[in-house]
Amino acid sequence: MKTESMFPNARIPYGTWGSSYFPSWQTSALAEVNIGQFAGEAMAKILGKKKVARDELEYLVIGSTVPYHWKFWNAPLIASCMGQRIPGLHMEQACATGLNTVIFAGSQVNTQSSDVVGVLNFDRTSDSPVGVFPERRSYRRTEVLADVWDNFGFDPSTGKSMLHTAGAAARKYKINRAEVDELTYLRYVQYFDAKESGIFNDIMFPFDILNLQGKKIGTVNDDLGIRKISLNSIRAMRELETCVTSGGQTHAADGMACLLVTSPGKAKELSPKPEIDIQFIAKAEVRTLPGLMPEAPGMAVQKLLQRTGLTMDDMTVVKSHNPFAVNDAIFSKMTGYSWEKMNKTGCSLVWGHPQAPTLTRLLIESFEEAVSLGGGYILNFGCAAGDVGIASIFKLN
């Protein structure tokens, strides 16, 4: 077994994390505010709820993929919104952002560059900006791009949409529509069962949304836009691409998620349960052929298991970022691991796709699930634009 920690001097202190709910596109007051400012203020509130003094932070790693007003100033601006004048770094890699920021923070601590690093990921797909680009190679000389929708609809390397990648991968692996419908239904059942169990109570936080005058314009206190759905209704949905329906794909959303990374000693000091130890084990990324994004996560996991000597049977918690239900069906076909064992507390297929914070929320949910199961190895993985797959293993003792 080659299971040594990739960052032996870095830990994630249990219970010092949190997330907003993820309201779907245009369903909440989050569509009306600067998401960066909201995220910084929300992280400050979460740290307060978790009884972590903000001045413990020495560095801030943020991730976002959709431009927001004053993004040029990036992490230092968001730190100021938290009430802390500390340096920081912005990272961006589509939906892989939320995991890569955590890994980078682990490296920052492991190399003793900082002792306590905050990780904050956020995005607002609602009312995403439109950019105007000088383009000398274009006959029009000026091109206009709606940041979210045009990028979802057009991959420059293939000329196809994200939806096309799901259908192409489903055809390659001969995925059955009936299986995908059953998988989709299970994911909704898992989410609502977890919600009713109360496992989200220490993870998800409600936030009042204020305008520039400080007046309340709304409250984000639920994953708005999600409703229970029957298997029959899923079966009746029109196929938009091979094995892809409106129910079998995620939706654009808004939100934030944050956690801390620090040294082993400091983790015990900051955590409300210092006996819980969360280690970084390994991470892998791959890039598959054009237009086959849904197979990339499985390839990343295979590479990760080969590198560590671990197997799927060693995993206590398995959670995936699955913008399409076919992702999980393909993963099961590639690895032999049943999709019924995965995503037991919910996943992005159901609660949405605000991009940067997606894998961060999945990771936080994984840690809470692992605690309820007595600890063990945690596998998180997902896909990202450009046919990229990312996977990581953590260990909770």
Image (tube, helix red, strand yellow):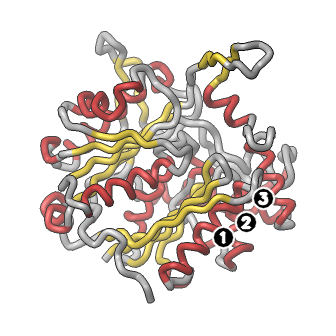
Residue displayed at 62% across by 43% down: 227
Whole-angstrom CA distance, mark 2 to mark 3, is 10 Å
- Across and down, in percent, residue 341 comes to 59, 73
Whole-angstrom CA distance, mark 1 to mark 3, is 12 Å
Q: Quadrant of residue 145?
A: top right
Q: Amino acid at mark 1?
A: Trp
* Residue matched to label 2: 329
Q: Residue furthest front?
A: 136
Residue displayed at 53% across by 69% down: 318
- Across and down, in percent, residue 212 comes to 33, 12
Q: Can residue 223 be seen by looking at this rendering?
A: yes
* Residue matched to label 1: 339
* Residue matched to label 3: 181
Q: Secondary structure at mark 1?
A: helix
How would you rate the neighbour count of disc 3 (Cα within 10 Å): few for under 14, some for 14-19, many for 20 or more?
many
Asked whether disc 1 touches disc 2, contact meaning CB atoms under 8 Å apart, the reply is yes
- Across and down, in percent, residue 116 comes to 20, 53
Q: Quadrant of residue 184?
A: bottom right
Q: Secondary structure at mark 2?
A: helix
